[in-house]
């Protein structure tokens, strides 16, 4: 119960509720002079007996009153700490309270004194608080009960009861802190059980090892609820570690605040030539656009060596999205994404922008092309942004610009959700028109049919997206190669994939590190898929020769797509229109198709390369033959897919061009050594393939090489060329000897 008892009474109440033991007697520490106030409690304390009045005890020692002094002293070797002294006095006090302060007890620092008194308050059942002055010479410090003081308003629910319990610390001439005054009386109820102690703020704090665990979980992008669950499991249950989500939330906020102060410096260190990113990847490159007026960066663009190699092979179609604001400052983040020969998303580069202006986008696209070797993409898909559209028209005039379908239909649920609930079948009909690879006529007829069927001619959202259909609808992109990146699912997966690694409100420094972690994981998945494609046999659903040929040339993922196309081709029959030139593929169940659907497609065979091309446009759009063209191939008994229908980027040989070590930072300059080396290497690969087909081709190739070597000798650099001549002569002689030994020649 609350009362104005003495120190012994206060402790006695606590002990009685816990163990009904005897009261606590304050003893005079040896060698300490006590300074009393004349009260009964003080007299009792002087005599070493139980206190009957207010426990206000004072101790004296010479104090520092002026001058600058250190905040703490170095621990003395062989000295007795306050904890050891308290344990020694524990038996003499005849109490179950183990940790108890006493006048004259010394500490090396204020922090040590605070921890000692806080442990004492936890044992008794109250909380403490104090104001630690920083940056000044402090010679006195009060650590008071959490209920000290009076509430500002009388009608508020406050824990303040004007409690006088406290310890007063003074600094001695030895730079230590000693207890000059101790008041042990409380005028409020104390906590009855240990679990109630966590209600006091001084006891409801996170330990250093817990904070480190939270930092690690935060770095791994673990959300708040999972952080709590992980800590509970780590400490064997909720009952063994008491805290609330608010504590973790405050800690995470403080961590973010601390990082923001030094974030810019850390990020510059990351991008520095001697930073970790450059050490891990010497081909890592970045560009920074600075604002001369505000002395800040406008745009940061970065990429690494693997991304630049990926772009060389798969940079024909890319997407660029700036709608994800994932950093502490709300800066737009741009992600350059492509798709490899396994139909996996690949990261080509990242960018942080302070402003989405035309000039910023112009600088960004210009520098991106330079970093990628001077080769602009054939097609780029972006979010809806007028400034970006203007910049692409000026900086990438030869590049086809289209909008990602995901961003156009981003508000579909908001505007069309009520319609989907009221009108059964609308959602399926809408997706059939927007997701299928239709012809322009099919799209226009299907759209009109949708408006008529559901009476939506006045729907503002549908009218808006229809007006800009040339920017996003598949039928208007069918003649443009997009590697099927226009699908909503691919863009969503890339963005969600990034959200899983880098959540909102992260510092730029951590943001860049998580970006590299994501890219590393994607590279591992790509390597794993490459290994599966090369080493694991393909399962053939049918015995068609054309399917066996597809298994040899395509990657595993693209082979499975081709297998699905063959399955779809079973729904069509072929009619000859012009023998060897044109055919018609007609759906066998045309009566079950939509009224606006096209059921017959014309397929032609190009004379120049033998490619089988359909009017549906899927081959031009994706680089894979459509089911109509495949049906014609099967109808004509083709054993292999025509060479004109094979797009190299989907094959196992998509990367057999330039090895990584031949790419240098100056590759974009056409007069650079790396550019010349790359061009010669590509031409050399084709030359070797052509010259190794037969003996006659080999002899012709060697004759050409001999002629070129003589011309190079006349141009100079004769040391390298002479070495090349000598090596090639040895190789030619060795080849002739080997051919003679075999007793014949190999021909295709």
Image (cartoon, rainbow, N blue to C red):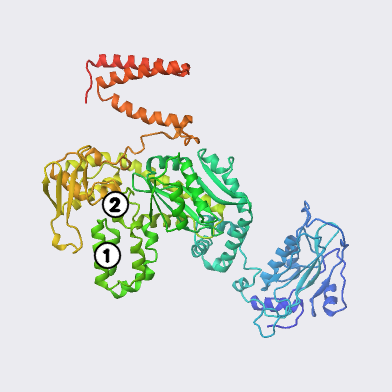
Q: Nearer the viewer, residue 178 or 276?
A: 276
34 lies above or below 314:
below
Quadrant in the picture for residue 707 = top left
Label 2 secondary element: loop
Residue 506 rendering spot, x and y as whole percentages:
54, 57
Q: Mark 2 points at which residue?
A: 478
Residue 316 rendering spot, x and y as whole percentages:
37, 44
| Quarter of the image where the N terminus is located | bottom right
| Quarter of the image where the C terminus is located | top left
CB under 8 Å between callouts 2 and 1?
A: no
10 lies above or below 274:
below
Category of crowding for the residue at label 2, using alpha-carbon neighbours closer than 10 angstroms: few (below 14), some (14–19), many (at least 20): many
Residue ID at (63%, 77%) = 192
Residue ID at (31%, 53%) = 477
Specify the farthest residue to the bottom.
155
Category of crowding for the residue at label 1, using alpha-carbon neighbours closer than 10 angstroms: few (below 14), some (14–19), many (at least 20): some
Q: Nearer the viewer, residue 514 or 154?
A: 514
Left or right, 626 with reference to 191: left
Label 1 secondary element: helix
262 lies above or below 734:
below
Left or right, 74 with reference to 491: right
Q: Name the residue under label 1.
A: 447
Residue ID at (19%, 51%) = 567
Residue 395 rendering spot, x and y as whole percentages:
46, 47
Left or right, 152 with reference to 368: right
Q: Residue 279 carries which label?
A: none
| Residue 745 shows in this picture | yes
Give me the C-alpha separation between circle 2 and circle 1. Answer: 18 Å
| Residue 541 shows in this picture | no
Residue 579 rendering spot, x and y as whole percentages:
11, 42
Mark earlier in primary sequence (2, 1): 1
């Amino acid at each position: 119960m609350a009362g104005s008892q003495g120190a012994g009474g206060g402790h006695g109440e606590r002990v009685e509720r816990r163990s009904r033991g005897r009261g606590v007697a304050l003893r005079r520490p040896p060698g300490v002079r006590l300074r009393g106030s004349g009260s009964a409690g003080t007299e009792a304390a002087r005599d070493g007996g139980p206190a009957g009045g207010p426990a206000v005890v004072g101790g004296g020692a010479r104090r520092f009153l002026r001058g600058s002094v250190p905040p703490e002293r170095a621990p003395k070797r062989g000295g007795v700490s306050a904890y050891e002294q308290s344990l020694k006095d524990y038996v003499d006090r005849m109490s179950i309270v183990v940790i108890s302060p006493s006048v004259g007890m010394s500490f090396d620092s204020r922090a040590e004194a605070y921890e000692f008194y806080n442990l004492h308050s936890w044992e008794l059942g109250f909380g403490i608080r104090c104001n630690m002055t920083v940056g000044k010479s402090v010679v006195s410090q009060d650590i008071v009960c959490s209920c000290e003081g009076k509430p500002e308003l009388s009608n508020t629910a406050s824990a303040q009861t004007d409690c006088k319990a406290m310890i007063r610390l003074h600094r001695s001439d030895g730079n230590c802190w000693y207890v000059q005054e101790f008041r042990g009386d409380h005028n409020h109820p104390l906590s009855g059980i240990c679990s109630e102690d966590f209600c006091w703020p001084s006891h409801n704090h996170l330990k250093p090892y817990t904070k480190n665990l939270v930092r690690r979980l935060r770095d791994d992008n673990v959300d708040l609820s999972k952080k709590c669950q992980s800590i509970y499991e780590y400490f064997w249950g909720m009952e063994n570690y008491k805290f609330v989500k608010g504590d973790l939330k405050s800690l995470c906020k403080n961590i973010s605040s601390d990082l923001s102060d030094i974030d810019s410096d850390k990020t510059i260190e990351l991008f520095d030539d001697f930073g970790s990113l450059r050490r891990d990847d010497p081909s890592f490159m970045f560009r920074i656009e600075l604002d001369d007026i505000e002395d800040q960066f406008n745009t940061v663009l970065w990429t690494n060596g693997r991304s630049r190699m990926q772009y060389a092979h798969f940079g024909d179609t890319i997407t660029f999205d700036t709608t994800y604001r994932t950093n502490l400052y709300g800066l737009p983040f741009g992600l350059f994404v492509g798709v490899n020969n396994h139909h996996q998303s690949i990261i080509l580069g990242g960018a942080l922008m302070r402003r989405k202006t035309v000039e910023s986008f112009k600088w960004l696209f210009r520098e991106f092309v330079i970093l990628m070797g001077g080769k602009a993409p054939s097609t780029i898909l972006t979010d809806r942004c007028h400034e970006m559209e203007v910049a692409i028209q000026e900086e990438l005039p030869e590049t086809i610009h289209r909008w990602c379908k995901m961003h156009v239909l981003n508000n579909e649920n908001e505007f069309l959700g009520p319609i989907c609930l009221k009108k059964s079948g609308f959602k399926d009909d809408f997706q059939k028109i927007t997701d299928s690879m239709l012809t322009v006529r099919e799209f226009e007829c299907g759209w009109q049919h949708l408006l008529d069927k559901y009476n939506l001619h006045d729907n503002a959202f549908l009218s808006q997206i229809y007006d800009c259909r040339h920017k996003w609808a598949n039928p208007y992109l069918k003649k443009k190669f997009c590697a099927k990146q226009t699908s909503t699912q691919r863009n969503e997966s890339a963005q969600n994939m990034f959200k899983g690694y880098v959540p909102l409100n992260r510092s730029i420094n951590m943001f860049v590190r998580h970006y590299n972690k994501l890219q590393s994981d994607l590279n591992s998945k790509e390597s794993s898929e490459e290994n599966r494609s090369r080493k694991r046999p393909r399962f053939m659903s049918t015995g068609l020769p054309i399917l066996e040929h597809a298994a040899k040339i395509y990657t595993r993922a693209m082979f499975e797509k081709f297998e699905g196309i063959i399955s779809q081709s079973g729904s069509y029959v072929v009619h000859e229109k012009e023998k060897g030139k044109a055919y018609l593929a007609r759906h066998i169940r045309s009566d079950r198709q939509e009224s606006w659907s096209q059921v017959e497609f014309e397929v032609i065979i190009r004379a120049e390369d033998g490619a089988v091309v359909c009017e549906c446009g899927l081959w031009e759009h994706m680089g894979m033959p459509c089911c109509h063209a495949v049906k014609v191939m099967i109808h004509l008994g083709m054993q292999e897919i025509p060479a004109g229908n094979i797009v190299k980027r989907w094959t196992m040989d998509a990367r057999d061009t330039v090895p990584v070590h031949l790419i240098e930072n100056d590759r974009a300059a056409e007069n650079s050594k790396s550019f010349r080396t790359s061009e010669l290497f590509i031409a050399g690969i084709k030359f070797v393939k052509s010259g190794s087909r037969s003996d006659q081709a080999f002899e012709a190739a060697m004759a050409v090489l001999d002629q070129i070597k003589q011309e190079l000798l006349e141009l100079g650099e004769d040391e390298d060329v002479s070495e090349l001549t000598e090596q090639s002569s040895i190789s030619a002689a060795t080849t002739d000897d080997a051919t003679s030994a075999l007793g014949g020649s190999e021909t295709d």
